[in-house]
Amino acid sequence: MRFLLIFLLIGFTVGLEFSMKTSNLVPEGRVEYQQKLSYDPDAEVLMVEAPAHNDNQASITLFDKKQNLSVTYLPAHKQCQLSSMPEDLDLKKMMTHSFHRQIAGDHFWNENSRTEYRLSQNTPMLSDEIEKLPTYVQEFCQGSLISLQNSLVVSESEFYNSTFLTFPHQSTQTRQLVFGSDLQGTQE
């Protein structure tokens, strides 16, 4: 219920018109979770909501194609992390794929997905930098620590090798979905 309330508040405050919405079951390891996608085709902004699962925190991420911006809000920590949008992420294809999976009753899955190992560093933004952000991002992140996130994709061995560390950093292992290539099939 609390997560739904956060979604409703964010939906009204960011000033975007999410006219396309889907909800899909996502398999990740031995866990399945419900992921919600909302898309504003005019603004070319996709919002992805995911509950806490495995070692991942609950999050709401906005992908803004026109601004080349990814904004991830972590409600448990009241933190917004800003970075560039993934280069190979096609928002329209991702939303279309989600619709097809929802209609078919299948899992949200892309056979082209891959695991990425990232070392990330979050640098808090200064107030004058925050004022330069789009208004909807300022509203979306209001009351939260806003940080720029710089990430370096490394190999699995570098990720787990303690000699390859930069401080301060946050190590994350993510499953990156690639939606720039042809989407086919579901997980078997």
Image: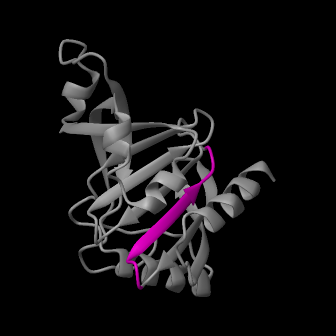
Residue found 45% across the figure and 74% down from its top = 186
Residue 140 in percent (x, y) is at 53, 54
Residues 146 and 96: in front is 146
Count the marks: how many?
0
Residues 35 and 78: in front is 78
* 48 in magenta: yes
Tell me which corner region of the image, top left, top right, bottom left or bottom right, holds residue 126.
top left
Looking at the picture, the colour scheme in use is one colour
* 97 in magenta: no
Residue 5 in percent (x, y) is at 76, 56
Residues 70 and 113: in front is 70
Magenta part of the chain: 42-52
Q: As displayed, is residue 77 above or below residue 114?
A: above
Task: Give the residue at the far top of this rendering.
Answer: 163
Horizontal arrangement in the rendering, residue 169 relative to residue 23 (left or right): left
Residues 148 and 31: in front is 148
Residue found 54% across the figure and 70% down from its top = 15
Q: As displayed, is residue 188 above or below residue 155?
A: below
Residue 9 in percent (x, y) is at 69, 59
Tell me which corner region of the image, top left, top right, bottom left or bottom right, holds residue 130.
top left
